[in-house]
Image (cartoon, rainbow, N blue to C red):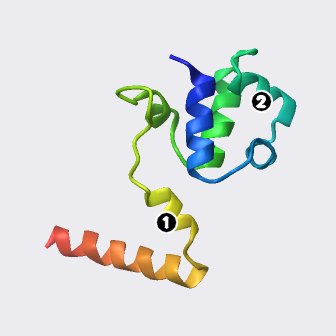
Amino acid sequence: MEIGKRIIVLRERKGWSTNRLANLCGLSQSFLRAVELGEKGISVESLALVCDAMGISLKTFFDWPGEEPPEDGFDRRLEQLTPYQKNALFRFLDAMLEDRSE
């Protein structure tokens, strides 16, 4: 498993530069780039920071069936919503969950 390549795929799917991801997760750009290139290893703690910044769990990161992560597009779409739209979506989801319990 090549962790660096998976980070690159996820980062690029979000349209993020290495610098943006590094800033979001609190790691240096040079360290993150070295991880992506396979020049350095990454601790579980640092990988958790990367995953948190990208809105995925460590489980999702490691559960890929192949070299490509799942492409559901939900995270990307959620990021594009305004705060008002996000609230509306969450109210809708809450209503769906309440309806299911009846």
Of mark 2 and mark 1, the one earlier in the sequence is 2
Which quadrant of the figure has residue 74? bottom left
Q: Secondary structure at mark 2?
A: helix
Instruction: Identify the amino acid type marked 1.
Output: Arg
Measured as percent of width and height from the top left, residue 64 is found at: 40, 30
> What kind of residue is marked 2?
Arg
The outermost residue toward the left is 102
Cα gap from disc 2 to disc 1, whole angstroms: 26 Å
**x and y percent of residue 1 in the render?**
50, 16
* Looking at the image, residue 40 lies above or below residue 48: above
* Disc 1 target residue: 77
Q: Tell me if I can see residue 10 in this picture.
A: yes
Reply above or below: 5 against 96.
above
Q: Nearer the viewer, residue 92 or 85?
A: 85
Question: Which of the 4 image quarters holds residue 12?
Answer: top right
Asked if the residue under mark 1 is in contact with the one under mark 2, i.e. CB atoms within 8 Å, the reply is no
Left or right: residue 51 compared with residue 40: left
Where is the C terminus found, in terms of image quarters?
A: bottom left
In the rendered image, residue 63, in percent from the top left (x then y), is placed at: 40, 29
- Residue at x 78%, y 23% (from the top left corner): 34
Q: Which mark is residue 14?
A: none
Determine the residue positioned at 81% across, 36% down.
27
Tell whether 99 sits left or right of 23: left
Q: Which residue is mark 2?
A: 33
Q: Is residue 28 visible?
A: no
Q: Residues within 10 Å of mark 1 (few under 14, many from 20)?
A: few
**At 43% across and 74% down in the image, what residue appears?**
90
